[in-house]
Image (spheres, rainbow, N blue to C red):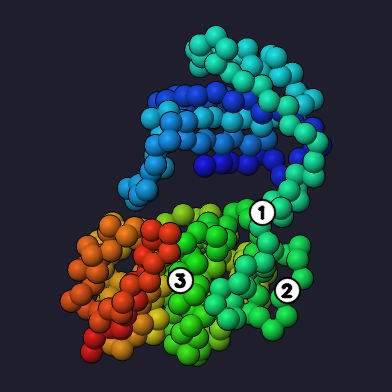
Amino acid sequence: MASDHNSGLSPSWVQLVFTITPEQAPLAEQLLDALGAASITFTDAADQPIFEPDLNTTPLWSQSRCIGLFDSQHDIAAISQRLQQILKLPANALQIEVLEDRDWERAWLDDFKPMLFGKQLCICPTAFEPLPDRINIMLDPGLAFGTGTHPTTRLCLEWLDTHAHRVKDQQVLDYGCGSGILAIAAGLLGAAQLDGVDIDPQALTATQANAERNQVAGQIRSYLPEQFKPQHQYDLLLANILANPLISLAPMLCQHLKPGGAIVLSGILLEQANEVAAAYAGFIELNPAQTHDGWVCLSGTRRA
């Protein structure tokens, strides 16, 4: 988890690294922000996976590694002393790491390159030329909650690529739209109208920005759940969220799907697939599950 406070990075940087408990995290973040950190990142310090948090929560690990990134022009010694005093860190608990000079604004390009999904769909960073003879989704890391690299997003994009005939000229709902990547893919495949819903306002901002970049903004409307009051049913419903919300939302989501309409559900761990399938079995004729790296995508058709 990371939060960026500045976008213009200078060429020389220092990381302050220390381990904290979840109770210390809010104070640590506030303190680093007040001291001028360019970014604040929390990572797992004890190899403790968090597969599925409760809705509207952002849990941390029992021991979290906190990393504050500072311009080297800051008084790093004074900042370190302040952190140790206020957070009551043990002696030698705070590490100072000087980072090599590099072009930070372009460093992500080393790991994020055009990716092909199926035969047509490609996610392409804006710094690259679009791939020829492909449907290119121009997308950069940033506010995006999903750039195609996670297995759940990959499974959904591959479904869209394979079932482009179920998308063209259709009304599509992307529930849990995140970066808008699935809605944008559907728009580029020829969907007539797209609605995106997400609990996070930043996701809606990312969706609209990415839709504009991909010239489908006129096709996409985005809503918070409390704003979402559709007056019609959809031909295709995409929901790449998590198993527990998928289960609890099953009656509502199926209500918004036309008889004969297609549904795609992702964000499901392999061991959760049967429970999610059972929640939809009364509404949906399910197809065989698709899996990738321990994650599952379920799809099917709404019964008449």
**Mark 2 or mark 1: whose residue is earlier in sequence:** 1
**Mark 3 or mark 1: whose residue is earlier in sequence:** 1
Q: Residue sitting at 59 percent across and 54 percent down?
A: 143
The answer to whether residue 230 of the structure is visible from this angle is no
Which of discs 2 and 1 lies nearer the camera? The answer is: 1
Distance from Cα at disc 2 to Cα at disc 1? 17 Å
Which of discs 3 and 1 lies nearer the camera? The answer is: 1
**From the viewer's perspective, is residue 179 above or below residue 47?**
below
**246 on left or right of 102:** left
User: Which residue in the structure is indicated by mark 1?
Assistant: 111
**Mark 2 or mark 3: whose residue is earlier in sequence:** 2
Q: Quadrant of residue 18?
A: top right
Distance from Cα at disc 2 to Cα at disc 3? 21 Å
Q: Amino acid at mark 3?
A: Cys
**259 on left or right of 170:** left
Q: Amino acid at mark 2?
A: Pro
Q: Residue sitting at 27 percent across and 78 percent down?
A: 286
Q: Position of residue 87 (x, y in %)?
A: 51, 16
**33 on left or right of 280:** right
User: Which residue in the structure is indicated by mark 2?
Assistant: 130
Q: Amino acid at mark 1?
A: Asp
* The one of 212 and 230 positioned closer to us in this rendering: 212
Q: Residue sitting at 39 percent across and 37 percent down?
A: 48
User: Which residue in the structure is indicated by mark 3?
Assistant: 156
Q: Position of residue 204 (x, y in %)?
A: 52, 61
The answer to whether residue 155 of the structure is visible from this angle is yes
